[in-house]
Amino acid sequence: MLSSQARGLSRLYALDVARALAIFGMIIVNVGPYNTDGWASWIVRGLNGRASILFVVLAGIGVTFLARRSLTKGITRRSTLLWRGLLLLALGLALQTLDHGVNVILPTYAALFFLAAFMVKMSTRWLFWSATASALLGPVLWILARQSTDFHIEPAQLGDSPFQIVAAILVSGPYPLVVWIAPFFLGVWIGRQPLGNVKVQRRLLYVGAIAGFGAFGLSQLLVRILGQPDTSDVDFDRLISAVGHSQMPLWLISASGTAVMLLGILLIVVPYFSQRIRLLVAVGQMPLTAYTAHLVIIALLIYPGPQDPLEGLLISCAIMLGLVLFAVVWIANLRYGPLEALLRKAPTFLRVHYRLPERHRRRQHARAYPRRAKPGTSMEQKPTPS
């Protein structure tokens, strides 16, 4: 049996491994190419729209863990989330200017952190129903916005006006917030669950598998009955699609389900292989650095990329190997990755002066000035009156 401390560490390792796998999946998709030639293309197409959903679900779980941390002097959870959102937004807009041909997810990621600064106190029940409602209504809102404005899907980047940046993040970009908020809500809700509980882990595995494969199978059945949606026009016939990045509910449910299934599997198996997966754990502990590095590598060395999926898969493996080696060496010497360390240091202008709640002040005072037992007595047992 594992101790409670070992179980907690294994749970964190499982999340680190999941982050590493999400990064690796996005590397394979971004290197590409996306076509139907050979078995390697099945891997690229299978990961398309699923690795990024896993990345967002894990972001929601991470926000929940951050919200559990005790307040530190001068820095609130809200200011920490706002700082991380600002940094992610600036980094995402800058990365989009590179010549890599990739739609950078970080601006939408930043918007999710901005929202998290004001939603971390939502009840667990409201989080679940918000995730469900977003998955069903978000795609409808996206279709209505597409029909009414006829926008072209373009990512935001440096040089765009504030209106263009906000519009791209909310609805007109490749990762519209009205749709992608659903897996984020789901991640925050999952983070509230006792992930060290075996029953919860198995429930994540089973429910995730049913949702993941069931939604995809339902889409295939509806396509056979009703026919393929017309891709030349945006209409409600698209609601039956489960194609990656279609922004449709069946794709959202399927991709979120497989993400939850994978998380359940990792929570179950990682405790038995914790010493053998340290390479993946190291990458998972610096996901922002790894994500940024792979985009720079693609822009400088690879784009416009390979034309054969097998060649692209080999190049992706080379990038992954390089990131693993870098992460292992870095984490062996420093606690956080370079960009992760920057995320943790909120600047002085975001520091606030506030009065801690009474319970926090009592707790801090008790830690700073522990009570001393009287001679001949102990803190565990009060002296018996004579």
Image (spheres, rainbow, N blue to C red):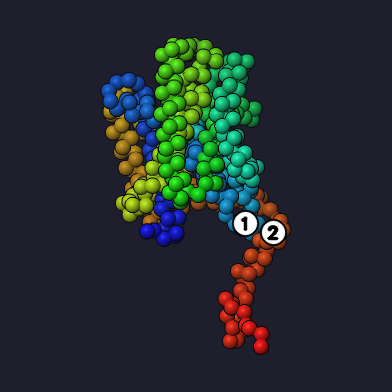
Q: Quadrant of the N terminus?
A: bottom left
Give the residue type that dot 2 points to: Leu
Residue 71: image tag: 1
Q: Could one spot residue 337 in this view of the protein?
A: no
Residue at disc 2, secondary structure = loop
Q: Residue furthest bottom?
A: 386
The numbered dot on residue 81 is: none
Position of residue 149 measured from the top left corner of the image (x, y, whole percent): 62, 16
Judged left or right of residue 195, residue 364 is right
Closer-to-camera residue (129/64): 129
Q: What residue is drawn where x is 34% and y is 39%?
A: 319
Task: Using the rendered view, name the quadrant where residue 4 is placed.
Answer: bottom left
- Residue 109: x percent and y percent? 54, 37
Q: Residue at x 42, y 37 (%)?
A: 206
Question: Mark 2 — residue?
Answer: 356
Q: Residue at x 60, y 22 (%)?
A: 141
Q: CA distance from mark 2 to mark 1?
A: 8 Å
Q: Nearer the viewer, residue 233 or 323?
A: 233
Task: Give residue 75's position: percent from left, percent from top.
Answer: 63, 54
Residue 383 in the image: x percent, y percent? Answer: 62, 83
- Answer whether labels 2 and 1 touch (C-beta < 8 Å): yes
Decide if residue 69 is on the left or right side of residue 207: right
Q: Secondary structure at mark 1?
A: loop
**Which kind of residue does numbered mark 1 sit on?**
Leu
